[in-house]
Image: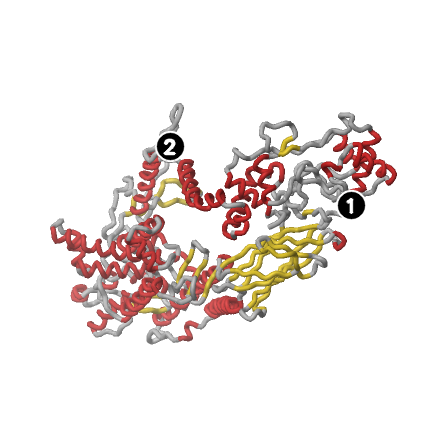
Amino acid sequence: MVEVVDTLKRQPGDAGEPQPQSGERGPLYEARRKIYPMRVQGTYRRLKWSLAWIFMAIYFIGPWLRWDRGPGAPDQAILVDLANRRFYFFFIEIWPQEFYYVAGLLILAGIGLFIATSMVGRAWCGYACWQTVWTDLFMMVERKVEGDRNAQIRLDNAPWTAGKIIKRGLKHGIWLLIAFWTAFTFILYFGNAPDVTYWFFTGQAPSVAYWTVAIMGAITYMFAGHMREQVCIYMCPWPRIQGAMVDEDTLIVTYHDWRGEPRGSKRDRKKHPEIAYGDCIDCGKCVHVCPTGIDIRDGQQLACITCALCIDACNSVMEKLGKPQGLISYSSVKAYNDLAAGKMKQVDFGWRNFIRPRTIVYITIWSLVAAGMLFHLATRDRLQVNVIHDRNPMFVRLSTGEIRNAYTVRVLNMQLEPRQFRIALEGLEGGRMRILGIDKPPAREFTFEVKGNKARALRVFVTVPQQQITQQRMEFAFRIEALDDAGKVAEMSRRKAVFEAPPPKR
Amino acid sequence: MAQRERDEVTGTETTGHEWDGIKELDTPLPRWWLWTFYATIIWGIGYTIAYPAWPLLNTNTKGVLETTNRLELHQELKVVQQARAEKLAQLEKLSLQEIRSNDELFQFANRMGAAAFKVNCVQCHQAGGQGAPGYPNLADDDWLWGGKLEDIHYSITHGIRYQPDTNPETRQSEMPAFGRDQILDGEQVAAVTEYVLKLSGQEHDAKKAEAGQKVYMEDAGCNACHGDNGEGNQELGGPRLNDQIWLFGGTREEIRAQIHSPKHGIMPAWKGKLDEATIKALTIYVHSLGGGVGS
C-alpha cells in the first residue's frame, strides 16, 4: 500500500507553528497558514490552462447554445425545465420518470472516477475539478493585480496605503464579478437564457433566481477566492477515499529521494565538501508553487491534488543546473521502487502500465453500463400509458343491470408534435367504453389527440351487460396505439386491467 | 482530574481522557468552521427577533417582521384566489351547458368540484360518490331527482327535506308511513311488498303480488309517485322501483319496512353555505362521475 502522509500532522519543530508551554491550552482554532503559490511555467501548467479554458468555455457558453425542436418546444440545447418537468440535452429529452438516465450518468461518472484514479491518480483533482479550475482563475486575477508570490507577501505586510486599497479593491471587484457571472450562468440552465437574462437585469426574474445567484456567487467567491486548498483538505471527501483507489501502478507525483537526498543548498555544499549531496538543492521552488502549500518531498500525501506544478518548477531548476529532468515526476510506487533499487534506468511509462486486471474490470463495467444506456436510449418508448382502476367505488350497478367500472388512462405523448392515438378494448366480451369529454356513443374503440410533449388523462367508463359477466374479476387489456400522419400504427402499448363485478347473489 | 498532555508526534494536546489506553487528540477546528458556527448562533438570535418566538404570560413575542406561517399561508391563498378570479367569474356567469362544452373551463370546474366534494359531500356520499345505504349513489344512472345538469344544480342549491321547510324551493320527500299511520293494514302492506318485489324482478309470491297490484294502483296510490310500472317520477322525487338499485335496501324485509314506516332522505341546501361558482363546479363534477344525463 501507498503510505499517505497526513499533511495536517505538523512536526513540533515546524516553522510558524505556535509552541504553547506544556500545561497551557492550545488555540481553539487552527489558524490558516496563508499560501502564496508562485507562478510557474512548463508542460503541465500549459496542459492545466488548456483544460481549464475548455471546461470554462463549456460551462459559460453552454446555456447560450440553441437547438431547434420545432414550434412550441424550447430551443435551448441544454435546459432543465423544472416548471414543466423536462430535461433537454440537444436531441435527447428526458421526462421525470426517465430519471434513471441521470442515475446511469451518475454511475458512469462514479466508475469513470475510479478508472481515472486507478490509472492516473487524482487527475480529477489536479485538472478537472471546478474547485481547481476556478481557484486557478482567481489566482491568475490575483497575480495580474498584485503581482507574484513575493509581491503578494509584501503587499500583505504593507500598511494600508491608497495603493494597497486600490489593488485590493480591484482584486476583490474582479473576483466578485467572476463569481457573479458564474452564479448567473448557473441559473441560465434552468430557463431560456435570453429571457432569463432580460428578466434578471430588469428586475422581473422570480426571487429564487436572485437568491440562487447570491448564494452560488458567495460560494464561488469564498471557495475560489478565500478558502481554496481548505476546501480540498477539510471539506472534500475524495482525498480520504484516494487511499483505497490508488495502488502500486497508479500515477502519482513523486519526489525521487534516492536521487535528490541528501539535499543541500549551494552554501551547504561549500561548507561540507565531504558530504556526497544529492540533486536537490533545496531551493524550495516546489513548495512555493504548490497550490495546497505542501512539500512533495515528504512523500505522497492527503493534500496533494497531483496538479504537477511542482514537476514544472523542479524541471526548470534542473534545466538551469544542467541536471537530468524528473527529480520530481509522475511515477508509480512500483517504478519508484525499481528506480531506487537500480532495476530501472529512468521512469518509463507506457500504455501497458494502464492495463491491469483492476482497470480492465472498471472499464468493462463502465462500458457495459454505457452500452446499456445507449441501447435503451435508442429504443425507448415515446408513448407511455398508465391505467388506474377506480377503487372507490370498484364497480357501479346501473339501472339496466349492467355493471360499470371506471379507469383513469394516462397517455403520455413523449414526442414534441401532437399525435393521434387510438384506445381499444382487448378481451372483455360485450364491454363498451365511454370517455368523459368525448361525446360519442359507447364503443369498443376511440381515437383522440394528445398535444406534443404532454400527458392526457382520460376518464374511461367501461360497461358490461349483466349476462356477460362470468367472473367477479375479469381480466382484459387496454390497447393504446400512436398513429402516424397516414393513420398507421407507429407505436403500441398494451396495459392489463381488471374488470370488477359484484359477488354473485346468494 | 484528567491529565492533558502533549502528543509527541503531532505536537497537539490530548483531551486528557484515557480509555483502555486510547487517547484522543484535541485537534483544533479550522477557523472558518468556527466562524460558520458563530454565524449560525447569530442567525438563531436574529431569527427569534424577526419571527414569533418567546412565550410570554398570555401571548408571545410577535417578531419584528410581524409575520407567521399562518399569515403567509393566507396571503398565498389570496394570491391563488386572484389567479383564479377570471375563471371563477366565468363559472358564475356562464350556464352549466356552456361550462360543460368549454374544455378548459370543464377541466377547471371538474377539479374544483372534486376538491369541494371531498370537503362537503363525502361524509354521506362517500369518496367516489358511490353512496351508502340511505345515501344515494351519485355515480350510477339512477337519479331520484333527475341527473341532468340543471337537476343536480337544483338539488345541491336547495337541498331535500322531509319536514316542512322555510325555503319553498326545497325538494320534499313525501313517502307516507302506510303502516304506522294505519293507511294500510298489515296484509295490504305485505301484499304490496310482494308486488314491488315483482316489479324489480325478484322472487315473490305471485298470488299476494296480484293483490298487491290493486293496493299499488288503487288503495294506496303508489303509482302517483312511483309510476304505473314502477319507473319512478323524478319531478316528485319518487324513486324507481323496477331496477336493482335500492336506497334503503331491496330485500323483502327492507321493502316492507320502508312501506310501513319509511326513512326519508334529507340533504342540506348549500345555497348560502357555498358560493355559486363552487355549486356549479360541484354540479359539473357530480355529473361527470359517470351517471350524468345529457351532455
Instruction: Choose top left, top right, bottom left or bottom right for residue A41.
Output: bottom left
Foreground residue among A389 and B223: B223
SS type, badge 2: loop
* Contact? badges 1 and 2 (CB < 8 Å): no
- Can residue A8 be seen by looking at this rendering? no
Q: Residue B44, which numbered label?
A: none
Please state the chain letter of the residue tagged with numbered disc 1 in the rendered image.
A
Residue placed at 33% from the left, 61% from the top?
A: A305
Q: Amino acid at mark 2?
A: Ala
Please state the chain letter of the residue tagged with numbered disc 2 in the rendered image.
B
- Mark 1 = which residue? A505
Foreground residue among A146 and A217: A217
Foreground residue among B116 and B166: B166
Q: Amino acid at mark 1?
A: Lys
- Can residue B91 be seen by looking at this rendering? yes
Task: Determine whether A128 is above or below B219 in the image.
Answer: below
Task: Determine whether A484 is above or below A29 in the image.
Answer: below
Label 2 packing within 10 angstroms: few (<14), some (14-19), many (20+): few
Distance from disc 1 to disc 2, alpha carbons, whole Å, reads 63 Å
Whether labels 1 and 2 share one chain: no
Q: Residue B53, which numbered label?
A: 2
Locate the N terminus of chain B and report the quarter of the image it occupies. top left
Q: Position of residue A2 (x, y in %)?
A: 39, 62
Q: Position of residue B76 (x, y in %)?
A: 41, 41
SS type, badge 1: loop
- Of tags 1 and 2, the one toward the viewer is 1
Residue placed at 64% from the left, 42% from the top?
A: B146
Q: Position of residue A316 (x, y in %)?
A: 23, 70
Image position of B101 (left or right of A496): left
Instruction: Choose top left, top right, bottom left or bottom right for residue A475.
Output: bottom right
Residue found at the very far right of the displayed protein: B207
